[in-house]
Image (cartoon, rainbow, N blue to C red):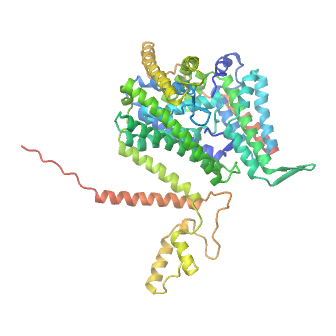
Amino acid sequence: MHMSDALLSPAIGGTFWVASGALIAWSAKKIAHEPDGVKTPLMGVLGAFVFAAQMINFTIPGTGSSGHLGGGLLLTVLLGPYRALLALASVLVVQSLFFADGGLLALGCNIFNLAFFPAFIAYPFLYRVIAGNSLSAGRIATASITAATAGLLMGAFSVVIQTTLSGISELPFGTFVLFMLPIHLAIGIVEGLVTMAVLLFVAKTEPALLSMQSQPSGKPAFIFQAFIITTLAVGGVLSWFASSQPDGLEWSMARVSGKEELQGNAATVHQALASIQQRLAFLPDYGFRTPAGQPETTPAADNPVNTGTTLSGIAGSLLVLLVAGSAGLLLRKKPQHEECSP
Amino acid sequence: MSFGTATEQRDAPEASGNLPAGDQASLGILALFIMFVVSVPKHNLPAVIAYGSFPVFFITAAGIPLRPIAKRLLRLSPFVLFMAAGNLYFDRTPFSAAGSFTITGGMVSGSVIVAKTFVALGAMHAFSLCTPFHRFGSALRSFGVPEVFVTQLQLVYRYSFLLVPEARSLRKARDLRSFGGRGNDLFSTAQLIGSLLLRTTSRAERIYMAMCARGFRHSLSMEQKKPFTATDTAAITAALICFAAVRVLFAP
């Protein structure tokens, strides 16, 4: 699933370079002051272990082909997200520079797709939630398969988005998604099974290894940051691919009345409120305001990029986060202080 | 991923000639070159071929062995080939004609994808064969990459040459004992990988003790940061002018 330089535009490649560089700097800062020095060589050796483990291939049942371990989730379970991101990023740098897997410009995309998703999304939100600190075979199996599959699917979907936005490929977005996701679903399940089997082997023979990773300090802050990143990505980028077809209500109205939008009431109060809404809406219909008399611009079919939609998506997402956060703060129960007994 | 050429790659830098500029400037020039190559429009094959002359000239002038590069380039990623084939299938608009044969837009853009991959990877290989890994680490340090990441990179590179032969021995031992493919299944192999993992972690502890005994203090950096010299600036400027000239001539 390595991206290639030839499939990227400089803008998309550069953007993901900045994103992955920021992730590396953030992770390096997080672990810089940890006193446990043995983890530095452990990270290096485990990074090399991923290379080595990829030499040992296995038969994929029912296909006649063979596969190998990817190692993203396994490293995260063993090292924790920050160290795993650094270890995986270093493996990708060595692969890119010395073994021609991926490319230099594509390195940012590859770190994002193959390291960020397993380390910062699949592990904290799926693996940790399902497996917790338990060493039970059932929990480790469920957590490994779910998290590995989800991590790979997110990475594959990200590849589709990066390629489509770069505009180099002629593959239609839908066809590309339909091609990539089922294949990576199968690969993800196999990766999950191998990760599960390795973790169960380790849990049986040396369980202490599974409890040595440092968890993110200040988990609520970490989760909040991850939510912000995901929200901005969904609001700012995925909104380009929203369907332009009418929604369920508009469709029903069109079937009944022949118009997608009903005419408003001619009453003065209604008109006044509509006028206020028109003036307050700084991004009407999820785009920039067009001067009176000019037709609305729609994005070209082959290029979904729309700055107005991006700004609307990001502004809307941040406003909802702000409103939801403020409501939560207002409704939060005040902690009851225990009175000290004399 | 193949480690067959890795030993050649590890040994080659010492044998190869020095780069005309410092490592820091060379890395910068490589990044600039790749940016110029990928920015070529998707239907402009001549411009990509023109950019291909830079790595060809560099490989020839530096006396880099051609075989490891050619072997690696010929093993193109199936993903890249799939994307090129996608263009071939989905873009059938006539682009030009050679006699009675119509060349479609997809044929050209698919060829551009493959050509860009060859050119970008060729340049990267030429750079990696001329730059020993510790000097690559120093170049990264001078760009302000966090020390923990550079140390991590150097450890991964160093220990992959120890662990890969061990993994190969494990695989060979398994293959010698498995008849008719028995023992190659996913769960048996996972136990083998688990065993390699346990050996790896115990090796990490021994390595740490050995490193501490040799004065390791969370960094493998032994060299002073090299300043950016006037030669480096001149090399980057010359490269920029050459790359821009090709762009203006072939893809205005």
Instruction: From the viewer's side, name the closer residue of A145 and A147.
Output: A145
Q: Quadrant of residue B176?
A: top right
Look at the image and tell me in which quarter the C terminus of chain A lies: top left
Q: In this view, does A239 lie above or below B187?
A: below
Q: Using the image, determine if residue A154 lies above or below residue A191.
A: below
Could you tell me residue B230's position as x and y percent?
67, 29
- With respect to residue A298, does A79 lie above or below? above
Q: Residue furthest left?
A: A342
Quadrant of the image containing the N terminus of chain A: top right
**Can residue A144 be seen in the rendering of this structure?**
yes
Q: Is residue A21 visible?
A: no
Q: Quadrant of residue A78?
A: top left
Task: Identify the residue at image location x=78%, y=23%.
Answer: B61
Q: Residue at x 34, y 60 (%)?
A: A327
- The foreground one among A147 and A168 is A147
How many badges with numbers are in the image? Answer: 0
